[in-house]
Amino acid sequence: MKVYKEAPFILVPIVLILDVILLVVSCFAGYSILVFLFSLILSLAILSRCYLKYQHNKISWSFKKYVESSSIDETVKCFIEVKNDSSLPIYHLKLNIESRNDKELVFTDGKKESSIFSIKIDLPPKSHKTIVVLVKGKSRGDHQWCNVELLLRDPLLMQAFRLEYDHNTLPKFKVVPRIFKLNDLRLTSMLQGYKLTNHSLFLDETSIIGTKEYERESFRHIHWLATAKENKLLAKKFQKVHGDEYSVFLNMVGSGQFHLRKDMEELIEYTVSVCLYLINEGCKVELWVNYSKGNHEILRLKNDLDRIQLKKIISTLALINPNGGFFPTEHFFKYSLRLKDSKSLGLVIGTPPKPNRREQLLHIKK
């Protein structure tokens, strides 16, 4: 914690020294009114400084939030507890919090948004107060407050101590990409019948276990009897045979070797939604991202069926930095296609490789 002293002109050290000199001169000259005036100024200055020096070590604050991460534009409720451990009251204590900019984190009251939060509180002796702060992430990534300060004033509002806290102790907020509910005909056709064939590798079409809402499947999947009874389109629900395996390739590099696409954020959000869709359907998902994780290694998350895989995918994509390392498109696909799971079907999101490398790939997002 750093302490900065703020005082009006009349209480700065040079002026106080002048007051002492004038006080001594007034005593010898017999000007009792001036003696009283200068004595009062010096007494109040000393009392104010003693109060602030004693109180500033008795103030502390703590932070709590009950969610590990949030999505873009999702409001998170945080709690800041300010504590007064002294036997004296504190009046007009001001709490100021600032985020780096309004494109990362903002504070909101439900109507207005700002990169600065400020509130004044009074604390009786041996008390604490909890302040609710609503924070909203405006972009994905690990964001942090850039400044938290407490402005402590004496009861007469003559002087103030500004208490600033170390940047490394300030709370962090993980903001993950948006997750959309996909109604993608191409993804549906892969599961209901890959490449619009009459056979699905994923479902046993001889074993009907019920009905479900029609989701633009093939007409052969419509359950006509149930549709007639319910007076709405219903599709057959088949028994799942096994979870198919997919390798998702996210390439955010554009036509130039190191030129990032302008729709980078959209591609990341689409990738998260695709992985969620496939994992919910019981598929195994392997993720390749054209991004360097250090030592010139391409970012890769291996196949897994567990829901933890989705959490790892979301957390990993949340931390991709536009200023990080990327590879040329052909280098990325040359390396990843050689090491990808041989049993999996490749799904390309973003810029695809040259046509001679697309035999085992399906480009689902341009």
Image (cartoon, rainbow, N blue to C red):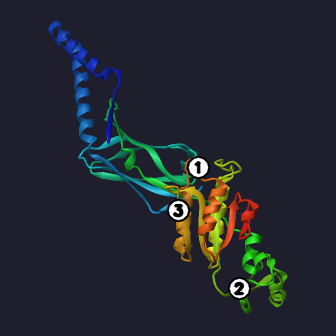
User: The N terminus is located in which quarter?
Assistant: top left
- Depth order, front residue of 103/20: 103
Q: Are marks 1 and 3 in contact (CB under 8 Å)?
A: no
Circle nearer the viewer, 1 or 3: 1
Q: CA distance from mark 1 to mark 3?
A: 16 Å
> In the image, residue 267 lies at what x, y percent?
67, 58
Residue 179 appears in the picture as rendered = no
> In the image, residue 106 lies at what x, y percent?
54, 48
Q: Which residue does the image show at 26% across and 46% down from the upper left? A: 58
What amino acid is found at the position of numbered circle 2 in the picture?
Answer: Leu
Name the residue tied to disc 1. Answer: 322
Task: Specify whether 267 is left or right of 228.
Answer: left
What amino acid is found at the position of numbered circle 3 in the picture?
Answer: Ser
Q: Are marks 2 and 1 in contact (CB under 8 Å)?
A: no
Q: Residues within 10 Å of mark 1 (few under 14, many from 20)?
A: few
Name the residue tied to disc 3. Answer: 315
Q: Is residue 271 above or below residue 188?
A: above
Name the residue tied to disc 2. Answer: 203
Residue 118: assigned label? none
- Depth order, front residue of 158/359: 359
What amino acid is found at the position of numbered circle 1 in the picture?
Answer: Pro
Q: Residues within 10 Å of mark 2 (few under 14, many from 20)?
A: many
Dot 1 or dot 3: first in sequence order is 3
The secondary element bearing badge 3 is classed as helix
> In the image, residue 33 lies at what x, y percent?
23, 14
Q: Which residue does the image show at 73% across and 72% down from the upper left? A: 187
Q: CA distance from mark 2 to mark 3?
A: 31 Å
Q: CA distance from mark 2 to mark 1?
A: 40 Å
Q: Are marks 2 and 3 in contact (CB under 8 Å)?
A: no
> In the image, residue 38 lies at what x, y percent?
24, 18
Residue 61 appears in the picture as rendered = yes
Dot 2 or dot 1: first in sequence order is 2
